[in-house]
């Protein structure tokens, strides 16, 4: 046998071994999935209470009946989410720039921003919804909003802006100081360096963590139900009260998932270190 | 070589400390029009700090820097206006990674010098072509070699029509085979009569391009003169020791 034939043989052998390993890996993964997931399903489905749970949580008739109503309420969640998110992105960016600026004239703003972030990140969002939603109308000051949807949106905005400020700030701080030097060296002012050189890089870097906060906000919109607006969770609760069946809550959960899962996939796409930069 | 003219940069008794550490202890140096001054000295001798102080990226503690006879280190002087009259090239290039090569070169033109987009683009393309980067205009820095990146950085610093260019160890971060193309770019600038202050470790390059060589040691200029004098027949022991260490390392 010639030498090249031996080499070709060895290569075929290696490739065959690689294929065998690959097939065996797939077989093990499939078997393991069947055992684990099947086991879990069996465990739940054979539990003594399952028939009852199925009736009260997964009732198809109730689901069909309540879904349109819950979906109706869900539009309020989506609208509020979009408006609050846009406001949070803008406010958070402004506060982060203030917090990282070194201009002496901004000192009081820097101080106030720090206090704001500490305060509103430290208070549970649900508490803020209560405080703003019930406290502000109680002041009975003219000119302040009284609509619970608006107040709930403000409470969510206050809470999330504090988080998002810190996300932006970490992005700004992660941009190498040489970038600022280079921007100043070509003759830009500090503000221009921020706008044209530092922020574009910072925002790209924090896109994934920002999206993460979107997902969280999208769910927390349900907290405004405390104040009474008929959003998805609230309606699900009402229907549940009428029918003594929890299935409407599952309908609401599915609607939230329909938004958060695709968002989460987008976050993952942006997860790579280079993926975030491009 | 055109004859050196009036002083463009005059550095007088400049001191600078970072905390307890005195980096510059009274530096005196003059760079005349069309002149290239090579600033040599060990790592940590203060070369970078001096260049950063001249471009007002660091505030000096004492002394004066004059640009065309006018003090620029007076606290009343607006640093932005001064930086627009100078160009600085960094050791690590410091290109803007989110911009293409062309955008890097255009940014200062557009935002600091108020050129229109079309003007800045025309000048940017011409400068990139001039430094051998035709066809790379739309590449981002991470698609360029180190030598190409540094040439973009030189084009960027040159785009603002500076009175003087400050070059901070522009070849130290490069693989050896890429050093030549960057030195060629500097040589071309010198050929055009650009006034330059060049911090460098490349002694053969200093010998070839510089009109003056200044040896910075422990925060002071210990010796200064034409390369034939400072590099070939140094007067001071410190200079001699520094040069022989470079020789041993195969860099001279």
Image (cartoon, coloured by chain):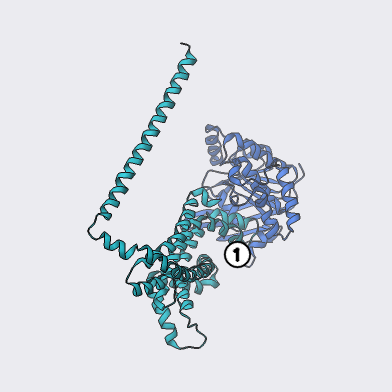
Pick the front one: A276 or A99: A276
* Chain for colour blue: B
The residue furthest front is A61
Instruction: Say which element carries label 1.
Output: helix
Q: Which hue belongs to chain A? A: cyan
Image-based side of A102 in relation to B206, left or right: left
Residue A233 % position (x, y): 40, 70
Indicate the quadrant where residue B145 lies: top right
Q: How many numbered circles does the render carry?
A: 1
Which residue was labeled with disc 1? Answer: A191
The residue furthest top is A1
On screen, residue A9 above or below A195: above
On screen, residue B210 above or below A213: above
Residue B225 % position (x, y): 65, 43
Where does the C terminus of chain B fall, quadrant-wise?
top right
The residue furthest left is A48
Q: Residues within 10 Å of mark 1 (few under 14, many from 20)?
A: few
């Amino acid at each position: 046998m010639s030498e090249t034939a031996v080499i070709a043989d060895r290569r075929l052998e290696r490739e065959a071994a690689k294929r065998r390993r690959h097939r065996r890996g797939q077989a093990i993964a499939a078997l393991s999935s069947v055992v684990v997931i099947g086991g879990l399903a069996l465990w739940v489905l054979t539990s003594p209470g399952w028939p009852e749970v199925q009736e009260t949580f997964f009732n198809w008739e109730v689901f069909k009946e309540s879904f349109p109503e819950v979906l109706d309420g869900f539009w309020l969640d989506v609208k509020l989410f979009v408006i609050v998110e846009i406001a949070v992105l803008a406010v958070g960016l402004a506060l982060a720039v203030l917090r990282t600026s070194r201009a002496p004239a901004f000192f009081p703003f820097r101080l106030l921003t720090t206090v704001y972030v500490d305060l509103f990140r430290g208070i549970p969002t649900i508490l803020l919804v209560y405080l703003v939603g019930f406290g502000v109308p109680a002041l009975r000051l003219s000119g302040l909003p009284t609509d619970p949807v608006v107040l709930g949106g403000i409470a969510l905005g206050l809470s999330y802006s504090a988080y998002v400020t810190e996300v932006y700030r970490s992005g700004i701080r992660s941009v190498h100081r040489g970038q600022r030097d280079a921007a100043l060296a070509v003759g830009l002012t500090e503000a221009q360096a921020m706008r044209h050189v530092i922020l574009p890089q910072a925002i790209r870097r924090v896109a994934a963590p920002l999206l993460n906060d979107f997902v969280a906000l999208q769910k927390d919109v349900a907290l405004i139900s405390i104040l009474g607006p008929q959003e998805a969770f609230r309606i699900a609760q009402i229907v549940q009260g009428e029918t003594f069946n929890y299935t409407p809550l599952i309908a609401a959960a599915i609607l939230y998932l329909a938004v958060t899962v695709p968002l989460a996939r987008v976050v993952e796409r942006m997860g790579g270190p280079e993926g975030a930069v491009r | 070589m055109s004859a050196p003219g009036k002083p463009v940069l005059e550095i007088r008794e400049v001191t600078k400390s970072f905390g307890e550490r005195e980096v510059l202890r009274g530096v005196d140096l003059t760079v005349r029009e069309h002149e290239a001054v090579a600033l040599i000295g060990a790592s940590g001798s203060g070369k970078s700090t001096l260049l950063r102080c001249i471009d007002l990226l660091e505030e000096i503690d004492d002394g004066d820097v004059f640009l065309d006879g006018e003090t620029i280190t007076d606290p009343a002087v607006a640093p932005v206006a001064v930086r627009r009259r100078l160009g600085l090239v960094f050791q690590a290039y410091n290109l803007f990674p989110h911009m293409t090569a062309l955008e890097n070169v255009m940014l200062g033109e557009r935002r600091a010098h108020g050129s229109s987009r079309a003007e800045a683009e025309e000048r940017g393309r011409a400068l990139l072509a001039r430094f051998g980067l035709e066809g790379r205009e739309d590449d981002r820095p991470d698609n360029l070699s180190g030598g190409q990146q540094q040439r973009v950085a030189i084009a960027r610093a040159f785009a603002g029509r500076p009175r003087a260019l400050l070059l901070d160890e522009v070849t130290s971060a490069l693989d050896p085979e890429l050093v030549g193309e960057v030195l060629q770019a500097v040589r071309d600038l010198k050929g055009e009569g650009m006034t330059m202050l060049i911090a460098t470790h490349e002694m053969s390059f200093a010998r070839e391009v510089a009109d003056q060589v200044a040896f910075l040691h422990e925060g002071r200029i210990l010796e200064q003169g034409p390369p034939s004098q400072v590099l070939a027949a140094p007067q001071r022991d410190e200079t001699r020791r520094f040069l022989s260490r470079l020789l041993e390392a195969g860099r001279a």
